[in-house]
Amino acid sequence: MLQFLKKYKVFIFTLLIFSILFLTLSYRFLNPKKRLPVMNPSDVNPEMVDDSVQFVSKYHTIANFSFTNQNGKTVTQNDYDGKIYVADFFFTTCQTICPIMTNNLVDVQNAFLNNSKVMLLSHSVLPEQDSVPVLKKYALERGVIDKKWNLVTGDKKEIYYVARKSYLVVKTGNASELYDMVHTENLVLVDTKKRIRGFYDGTKKEETQRLIADINFLLKEDD
């Protein structure tokens, strides 16, 4: 037996190496590493994207912004620097999808209540109606926690700008109603580099859970 091993030791060693490589590659193939795509305007339904950025295929990031939150504080990109956050568009008197989306975002808020690296940002698509006091009342009624979640109002054209050119999620009315936005159910996941990493149906619990899982994935990715 010993002589046999000596005679074929090179063959046995080579076979062992190939076996290890085969098993390793097979495991990776059958259990691929999770990845979250980096989303660009060219990856998204053109209806949601402003014509000026529609064919951008790489390096898309959220543009700088400045709005006013439920406490009358100015909120800018600086407040979200180095943060993973979820953005959406709503209005306080909406009786259809907005209450459902807000309830599901409360779940996201609570899932990361003690993690300062995760925040939320909701933009009113009816800023002329959703004043600071109105947003504050809505925040108190819905369980919004100020340190985690900004509900913002501001110039309607600026909100339209970030909706169409940055977050790529809001439809418009006809050409004569350029700034009359039809908000959607989309929640947008933004990473610490201001890149879009996913879109989620904010009206569905299972999508909310997927969002929470993806946030946890990004937190590990950034470690």
Image (cartoon, rainbow, N blue to C red):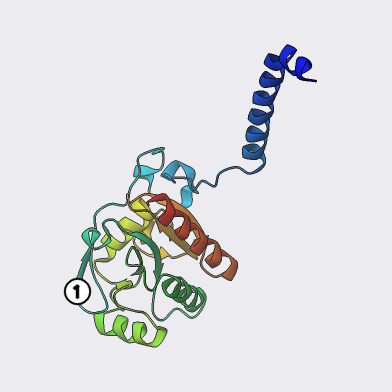
Report the residue at 26% width, 60% height from top: 158
Q: Is residue 116 above or below residue 95?
A: above
Residue 82 visible (yes or no): yes
Instruction: Report which quarter residue 210 is drawn in.
Output: bottom right
Q: Would residue 36 appear left or right of 14 to someone viewing this image? A: left
Q: Position of residue 103 (x, y in %)?
A: 48, 78
In front here: 175 or 160? 160
Q: Secondary structure at mark 1?
A: loop
Residue 174 visible here: no
Quadrant containing the N terminus in the rendered view: top right
> Residue placed farthest to the front in the image?
2
Tell me: residue 129, above or below residue 47: below
Specify whether 161 is left or right of 206: left
What residue is shown at x 35% (from left), y 40% (from top)? 59
Quadrant in which residue 128 is drawn: bottom left
Residue 36 against residue 11 in the figure, above or below = below
Q: Residue at x 76, y 19 (%)?
A: 2
Residue tagged 1: 73
Tag 1: Cα neighbours inside 10 Å, few (<14), some, or many (≥20)? few
Residue 192 coordinates in the image, percent (x, y): 33, 53
Identify the residue shown where x is 41% and y is 37%.
Answer: 57
Residue 113 position in % (x across, y down): 39, 74
Residue nearer the viewer, 62 or 34: 34
What is the x, y in percent for residue 64?
24, 54
* Relative depth, front residue between 18 and 177: 18
